[in-house]
Image (cartoon, helix red, strand yellow):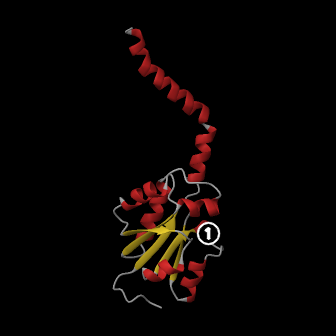
Amino acid sequence: MKSTSPFTVVYTSGSWDLFHVGHLRALVRAKSYGDRLIVGISTDELMLSYKKVKPVIPYKERREIIEAIGIVDKVVKQERLMEIAQLKKYKVDIATIGDDWEGKHLDGLEWMKQNGKKIVYLPYTRHRSTTLIKKKIILNAYELIRADLERELEIDLPEKKRR
């Protein structure tokens, strides 16, 4: 079932938490498949339901970041993963998703297949992910706290000397 739109509409979605170069590359690749890019952003509740952890950056701020990226034509709230109703509403021709989802069942992807629409699995940036960023922060927590305390002391020391 081909879209009646003169434009090719691409839909991609994600959590977009702790936005990094892997996210940016996914958006650039998704946009390269069509004329209009619609980006679904998972709500905090949805992320908690399937990732079992709350996002670091709240939904409204993640949305603001994605809306500021010039190649994104529309941002939509995603309350269910790859929701069929949104794919229909926006007359999506192509859905892109990270290749870490390949082989996993999502209703929206099945609907795309059944309706002759294209699904593109984008390469997952394995060396850069939100999970890896969180792990790096945890592993470097002592150094981060120490450096922060040193900066605070350097700022406070000159004031104390004046007394």
**Where is residue 112, by image quadrant?**
bottom right
Disc 1, SS: helix
Check the image and report above or below for 141 versus 82.
above
Q: Residue at x 42, y 71 (%)?
A: 38
Q: Residue at x 44, y 64 (%)?
A: 27
What is the count of numbered marks? 1
For the residue pair 106 and 113, the one nearer the viewer reads as 106
For the residue pair 158 and 113, the one nearer the viewer reads as 158
For the residue pair 138 and 30, the one nearer the viewer reads as 138
Amino acid type of the residue that numbered disc 1 sits on in the rendered structure: Trp
Q: Which residue is mark 1?
A: 101
Q: Position of residue 8 (x, y in %)?
A: 39, 80
Q: Residue at x 47, y 24 (%)?
A: 152
Q: Position of residue 101 (x, y in %)?
A: 61, 69
Q: Quadrant of the C terminus?
A: top left
Q: Residue furthest bottom?
A: 1
Check the image and report above or below for 93 versus 21.
below
Q: Position of residue 64 (x, y in %)?
A: 39, 57
Q: Position of residue 48 (x, y in %)?
A: 61, 59
Q: Residue at x 35, y 58 (%)?
A: 68
Say few, some or many: other residues with alpha carbon within 10 Å of mark 1 (under 14 / 14 to 19 / 20 or more). few
* Drawn side of residue 114 relative to residue 60, left or right: right
**Where is residue 155, by image quadrant?**
top left
